[in-house]
Structure formats: C-alpha cells, structure tokens
Image: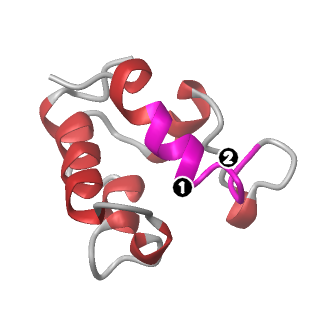
Amino acid sequence: TYTYTANIASILNSDCVPCHNSSSAQSGVSLSSYSSVMSIVTAGSSNSILVKAVQPAGPMYGQLSGNRTTKVQMIYDWVVNSKAAQ
C-alpha cells in the first residue's frame, strides 16, 4: 500500500513540481499538493491523467529521474491499487 505523503510526494516534488507548481503550472497543472494532484487523478483508475503521463509512451516519462520503471510502477500502484490514499 502506497500513500501520497509517504511515497508519492517525494517523486513528484523532485521530478514534477519544478515545472508543475502553483506559480508556474505548466499546461495548467500543479502537482505541489495532494489536493492539486487529485485534479488529475481518479482513485482506482488506470486512465488517470497522471498514470498515463508517466508511462513509457507518455509525455512526462522522460522527466522522471533515476529508476523510472520503479517510479512509474509506484505511481500506478498508488493511484490504482491504493486508491490514491493520502
């Protein structure tokens, strides 16, 4: 089980928030808080924008640092299996 606070926030803060924050929300998306992330997440849905964006064919996959495969799987598991728990 993954939670936003314990597992996902650190990924988003390091890899996504530099461009997707409250002051420069590229494409109108801020990922700087749980509530803002939830604007592009549907708990339990693999069709959530965040899940699709970080997949290997997605537009944000290349922005992930380090072990992309692990990060993509964690985000997927958090949204789909952990129902985007805070």
Tell me if mark 1 has few (under 14), some (14-19) or many (20+) residues whose alpha carbon lies within 10 angstroms of its own: some
- Residue 44 in view: no
Find disc 2 in the rendering and name its residue: 30
* Residue 39 x %, y %: 54, 40
Vertical arrangement, residue 59 with respect to residue 78, above or below: below
State which quadrant residue 18 falls in.
bottom right
Circle 2 SS class = loop
For image coordinates 34% across by 40% down, the residue present is 42
Q: Residues within 10 Å of mark 2 (few under 14, many from 20)?
A: many
Residue that appears at 40% across and 54% down: 50
Q: Which residue is mark 1?
A: 15
Q: Residue furthest bottom?
A: 57
Residue 2 sits in which quadrant? top left
Magenta range is 9-21
- Residue 16, compared with residue 33, is above or below; it is below
Q: Is residue 72 visible?
A: yes
* Residue 54 coordinates in the image, percent (x, y): 36, 64
Query: Could you say which is closer to the camera, residue 52 or residue 14?
Result: 14
Spot occupied by residue 43 in the image (x, y as percentages of width and height): 29, 33
Using the numbered discs, state the Cα–Cα distance from disc 2 to disc 1 in whole angstroms: 13 Å
Please tell me which residue is depicted at 17% across the width and 40% down the height of the picture. Answer: 77
